[in-house]
Amino acid sequence: LQNDNHQRERHGALASPTPPTGAAEDWTVPQRWDELTAEDHWVWDTLFARQQTLLHGRAVEAFGQGLDVLHLSRPGVPNFDELNDKLHRRTGWTVVAVPGLVPDDVFFRHLSERRFPAGNFIRAADQLDYLEEPDVFHDVFGHVPLLAQPDVADFMQALGHLGLEAVELGALHRLARLYWYTVEFGLARENGAFKIYGAGILSSFGESHYSLESAKPHRLNFDLRRVLRTGYRTDSFQLSYFVIDRFEDVLKLVLRNDLSALYEELDRSPDLSPCSIEEADLLAA
Ligand SMILES: C[C@H](O)[C@H](O)C1=Nc2c(nc(N)[nH]c2=O)NC1
Ligand SMILES: [Fe+3]
């Protein structure tokens, strides 16, 4: 089962720099919601029902609250105009449609201006658990509910600015790790128990089980330097998860630290593999 969304751990630019035909300079396209098929809506409803049941008691509370305030439980693929009506009023974010993966600088530019790029397609009905690129279910069900939460909304915009800086500094591989181990595969401690907030887990049936129940992965306390040094796997469930307590703590951490100085410092020590355990690691309990 391939991990349901993302690309190889990066060291070079991703997609070709020029937007595909029909896309704007910033790679956005019209959603054309009324052109979605009954099968597209069936796939959304099937994935939604399965995950909503499974995530009850497994996801952070803010996720369920986000689903409610954004009325995402209504049937069918959400119409972005209606969704943005509610989302923008809450945290100033909007969801924009893109044809698929966009170049890193384009992606982080959007985040830095509180626009979340969502893949304007949905996986096939016979491939509910397999995905090459992030589709609308991963992007809207996995990422958008928490964008209705002010601290997460601020954190994602900060990552946008840090991403643009990292592209300039040639340190994108480090910032991509922070993005990966928080926004995509993050766990949090809530009322003494591990809960899911990473979109890559929230939108994956298999990893929603594995990330909380399997004895295989390491669950480590979030540590900024450790995360920036740690590689990640894109072709399997994660071998390590990093656990935070509160979003505002991580937000303060990335805003208080001069990441560019950190990148230089970390270039002097070896990177860590996704499954390594260090002396200094604090196992999350
Ligand atoms: C940020 C992350 O590391 C990664 O570089 C990217 N993610 C995405 C992307 N493009 C889209 N549409 N969705 C993503 O999640 N481009 C780049
Ligand atoms: Fe994602």
Image (cartoon, rainbow, N blue to C red):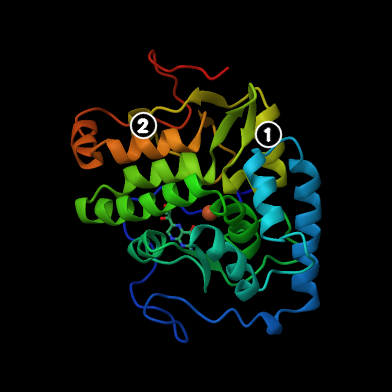
Q: Residue 265 in the image: state x and y as whole percent.
A: 19, 31
Hey, which residue is sitting farthest bottom in the picture? 22
At x 39% / y 13%, what residue is drawn?
279
Estimate the spatial distance between the alpha carbons at disc 2 and disc 1, rounded to whole Å: 24 Å
* Residue 133 seen from this side: no
The residue singled out by tag 2 in the image is 224
Residue at 23%, 51% in the rendered image: 170
N-terminal label among 2 and 1: 1
Q: Residue 221 vs residue 262: left or right?
A: right
Asked if 245 appears above or below 20 in the picture, the reply is: above
Q: As drawn, is 129 to the left or to the right of 17?
A: right
Foreground tag (2 vs 1): 2
* Crowdedness near tag 1: few (<14), some (14–19) or many (≥20) residues, C-alpha within 10 Å: some
151 is higher (above) or lower (below) than 273 = below
Q: Is ligand 2 closer than 8 angstroms to the Cβ of mark 1?
A: no
Left or right, 143 with respect to 257, comes to: right
Picture layout, residue 111 above or below residue 227: below
Classed neighbour count for the residue bearing mark 2: other residues with Cα under 10 Å, few (<14), some (14–19), many (≥20): some
Question: For the residue marked with disc 1, what is the amino acid?
Answer: Tyr
Q: Which residue is mark 1?
A: 210
Task: Name the quadrant containing residue 49.
Answer: bottom right
Residue at image coords 69%, 40%: 208
Which image quarter: residue 135?
A: bottom right
Q: Secondary structure at mark 1?
A: helix
Which residue lies most toward the front here?
89
Q: Identify the amino acid type marked 2.
A: Leu
Q: Is residue 67 left or right of residue 228?
A: right
Q: Is residue 16 in view from this perspective?
A: yes
